Amino acid sequence: MPPRRRRAPAPQLNDAAQLADQLQAAGYTKRDIAHIINRDPSLVSQFYTKNKGAAFVPALTQVLAAVQSAGITDTAELAAIAAGHITRRTTAAGTKARVRTKALLITPTGTGTGRAGAQAIASGSARLRPLIAEAARQGLRLAFTVRLARSGYVHASGSRTDSPGIRRDVIQRTDHTEERSYGSAATGGFDAADFARRVDQSAGDVTAAIHQWLLDTGRVHPGAHITHLEIRTWRPR
């Protein structure tokens, strides 16, 4: 009988990842941690996958102490604490390294777009939540396009009851799904603040919030499954 292969031990997490784990155990998400250190969320993931984050250990240590000892929970306060303990690393040439900060969600004119495909939909389209939250903060309007099986819609394609004023915005796919748009600049769209509240009520699940709106307004059947989602924002005139 051949000897059984031994599994390689799991690599030990670096200090930044261990601190991030403790903050997550305290209720913060990786996105929250990224906000606290003013960096892109992808960097926090690289604490685990690429052994990065050494420069943030002092800041994360202070943040964790503030949470555990001082009872501070507000991310803005924690970000202020972290800021005093973050120093920009330098390149081999001695210049300050470029920083990958949070991605710009909305332009100064109020225009923003976010899309979620099948994989993101399965996890609640979390990437769209910051876009909706920022649109709400700025008092913007929004519209969205959903894609689901034709049989999932209540109204026929192009029905004015389904989407008044934008009947042309229906795209039929060969896989028996259909894209329909709701809201536009021409029709006034929807209040982003209302949808931000809906997302909060759905525990941050954007897909569930949009699905519930479609149900509440009688546009889809309860079993309808959204496969793609797009959010668009603009500043009202």
Image (spheres, grey):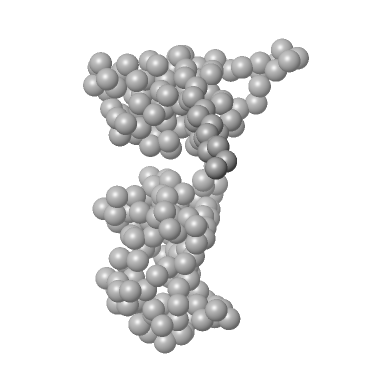
Asked whether residue 154 is in view, the answer is yes
Q: Nearer the viewer, residue 104 or 211?
A: 211
Residue at screen point 48% across, 71% down: 147
Residue at screen point 42% across, 24% down: 18
Q: Is residue 79 above or below residue 135?
A: above
Q: In this view, does 177 lie above or below 51?
A: below
Q: In this view, does 62 lie above or below 176?
A: above
Residue at screen point 34% across, 60% down: 208
Direction from residue 164 to residue 116 in the image, left or right: right
Q: Nearer the viewer, residue 105 or 46?
A: 46
Q: Quadrant of residue 216?
A: bottom left
Asked whether residue 140 is in view, the answer is no
Q: Which residue lies furthest to the right in this view?
A: 93
Q: Nearer the viewer, residue 26 or 161?
A: 26
Question: How far from the left and from the top, in percent, is residue 6?
Answer: 52, 34
Question: How far from the left and from the top, in percent, is residue 123?
Answer: 42, 54
Count of all numbered marks drawn on residues in the image:
0
Question: How far from the left and from the top, in percent, is residue 211?
Answer: 35, 66
In which quadrant will I find the N terminus? Answer: top right
Q: Nearer the viewer, residue 202 or 132?
A: 202
Q: In which quarter of the image is residue 70?
A: top left
Q: In this view, does 79 lie above or below 207?
A: above
Question: How far from the left and from the top, in percent, is residue 54?
Answer: 53, 19
